[in-house]
Image (tube, helix red, strand yellow):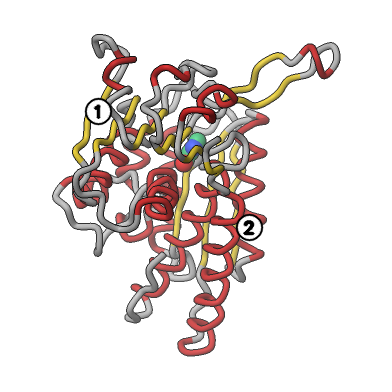
Amino acid sequence: MAVVIDGKEAAASVIAAVTEATAFLERETGVKPGLAVVIVGNDPASHAYVNSKSKMAKQCGFNSIQHSLAEETTQEELEELVAGLNADPAVHGILVQLPLPKHLKAEPVILSISPEKDVDGLHVVNAGKIATGDLETGLISCTPAGAMLLVHRIHGRDLSGLNAVVIGRSNLFGKPMGLLLLAANATVTMAHSKTKDLASVCRNADILVAAVGRPQMVKADWVKPGATVIDVGINRVPAPDKGEGKTRLVGDVSYADAADIAGAITPVPGGVGPMTIAMLMANTVVAAYRTAGKTAPRF
Ligand code: GUN
């Protein structure tokens, strides 16, 4: 049976460090980290995510600002709001929740955020810094940063000699995750929907990272015995055993079977999920330290 990687506990220790760093910064400089979260439209799942981000920001001692915009918001209105937040010295981090309603283009909005305030790490300047191996001066996308923290807990800082396979190539997760593994000296394969014989590619992985958004797609016989399995999927599926109309969350990995083969595995929920919000808080306090001219803490 694999070691179950406790994301809730890892996230709580990041949050404790962020809270302490926030108090120190305010004491030393009077600067209170400010996080502005922007949501457009009425998607209930997105509202739930955003509310938990705003709540956690308050818990860390930040100035937490939430902008909830109507579904009909125009591209110009959204970019004007971002421009105002860019210019506001009390705001150190800006997050525009994705996906946006269909009539809005995400890319120009992301590019309109000041890279220094892009706590999502999605601006091309921040993506480019990871791609060129600069992990020090930019902001790293929260879910891959959180997944890496879990990988480092199992394998230490240096992944030399280990094969890592990332399934999924999104800008939000797969690409930065592959680059972070590479920067830590892993030998990285980026697999995706067009990969030939995905199962045998995965069987080569000492570190297998699944981010495909397909419930329980990764089967136990895709897992190399003893491998570390990081499941980034959060899929809601019907759970008739819990009662009519009930659902449950499952990952992209067939957890119960894979846990018999893996050396370490993240559960869903309670694995990578809690790390995303924790790393968002970490990025915000880092951005505030930089603005105040102080050396930022590391997480
Ligand atoms: N929607 C789902 N995950 C994320 C995230 O990490 N950042 C943003 N901005 N939107 C999301």
Specify the amino acid type for callout 1: Met
The extreme right residue here reads 243
- Residue closer to the observer: 101 or 75: 101
- SS at badge 2: helix
First reached walking from the N terminus: tag 1 or tag 2: 2
Residue shown at the point (37%, 54%) measured from the top left: 152
Measured as percent of width and height from the top left, residue 176 is found at: 29, 41
Residue shown at the point (34%, 57%) measured from the top left: 156
Residue shown at the point (37%, 79%) measured from the top left: 292
- Residue closer to the observer: 95 or 166: 166
Judge the density around disc 1: few (<14), some (14-19), many (≥20) Cα neighbours within 10 Å: some
- Residue closer to the observer: 266 or 37: 266
Residue shown at the point (53%, 55%) measured from the top left: 278
Measured as percent of width and height from the top left, residue 297 is found at: 39, 73
The extreme bottom residue here reads 28
Judge the density around disc 2: few (<14), some (14-19), many (≥20) Cα neighbours within 10 Å: some
* Spatial CA span between label 1 and label 2: 33 Å
Tell me the mark number nearer the camera, choosing from 1 and 2: 1
Please say if 173 is above or below 88. above
Measured as percent of width and height from the top left, residue 111 is found at: 30, 43
Q: Horizontal placement of 54 versus 161: left or right?
A: right
Q: Which residue is mark 1?
A: 190
Measured as percent of width and height from the top left, residue 227 is found at: 38, 35
Instruction: Identify the image quadrant of the N terminus.
Output: top right
Count of number-bearing discs: 2
Tag of residue 181: none
Please say if 296 is above or below 254. below
Q: Which residue is mark 2?
A: 56
